[in-house]
Image (cartoon, helix red, strand yellow):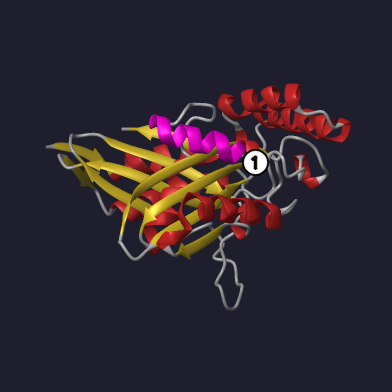
Amino acid sequence: MRQISTKVITAAVKEAAVRANYELGSDVTDAFRAALEKEQSPVGKEIINKLIENAEIARRERIPICQDTGLAIIFAEIGQDVNIVGGSFRDAVEQGIREGYKEGYLRKSVCDPFTRKNTGDNTPVIIHLELVPGERLTLWVVPKGGGSENMSRLFMLPPSAGWKGIKEKVLQTVLEAGPNPCPPTIIGVGIGGNFEESAILAKKSLLRHLGAPNPDPELASKEQELIEEINKTGVGPQGLGGRITSLAVHMLVMPCHIASLPLAVNIQCHASRHEEIAI
């Protein structure tokens, strides 16, 4: 049995929250440069160049990539041979977010849904926890902005809808979103499970390294089919027209009830922020 102190967790989450908001991953900036080669619209090219410049300035000057520094989402895999000591796991994670958002001068974006009063420290945190074999703790700190999250959708389709119906809903979601999620976007697609699990699958799919192929060849083919259709819509960078509406489609699938076909579309803005921690 391996012991991990809550103090270690707090310190790691604090650092990751700041780093995720200051440093856009190289997979994303590489995708920007690849998109620049494909984009034909002069305005679209200018926008992508500005996104690259913005990411470079944020990294160099140690300032947020975007003013919306997001609702903090944590994906956690806890080894079944890990014993967390010194307090509760949730308290440790939330303290890390609290300290990171304060000391990193990150905007606090969490409020009461009715009164709209800000909680003042960007907590509570959304945690998705999975127990796995071993004695390792892995965390993904994901600041998710409101603009792209607002454009995400969940559908409970009839089984007869099939792949054709899934594709139609994904394209409908992208078109209705238009400029609101700050394209070029990354489209997370979760299929199967049930109502809530499809949404988690869609969000979790966004953790995959941008540009890495889906390990399932059939899903990789479907992702390619979707990205080609999405980039024919003409929404373009920042919704001002062009070839590059989205940088990628990431898909996760699991079996579902015979009477259901759950589909979730989680849209991620161009600032795809997530930081992995292994303890």
Q: Where is residue 203 in the image (x, y as percent from the top left)?
A: 47, 48
Q: Is residue 221 above or below residue 188?
A: above
- Residue 180: x and y, percent? 72, 54
Q: Is residue 10 visible?
A: yes
The quadrant in which residue 234 appears is top right
Q: Does the magenta stretch include residue 6?
A: no
Most foreground residue, 260 or 80: 260
From the top left corner, tell me how far across and down residue 219 is, in percent: 44, 37
The percent position of residue 88, horizontal first and vertical second, equals 28, 54
Q: Is mark 1 on a helix, strand or loop?
A: helix
- The majority secondary structure of the magenta stretch comes to helix
Front residue (pair 98, 37): 37
Residue at the image position 30 percent from the left and 62 percent from the top: 258
Instruction: Pick the residue in front: 104 or 20.
Output: 20
Above or below residue 256? Residue 105 is above
Relative vertical location of residue 242 with respect to residue 146 in this rendering, above or below: above
- Which portion, as a residue range, is magenta? 215-227
Residue drawn at the location 42% of the way across and 34% of the way down: 218
Q: Which residue is denoted by mark 1 in the rendering? A: 229
Q: Which residue lies furthest to the left in this view?
A: 1
Q: Which residue is drawn at 24% across and 48% down?
A: 86
User: Which quarter of the rendering shows the N terminus?
Assistant: top left
Which three-letter amino acid code belongs to the residue tagged 1? Glu
The single residue placed furthest to the right in the displayed view is 42
Residue 108: which quarter of the image?
Answer: bottom right
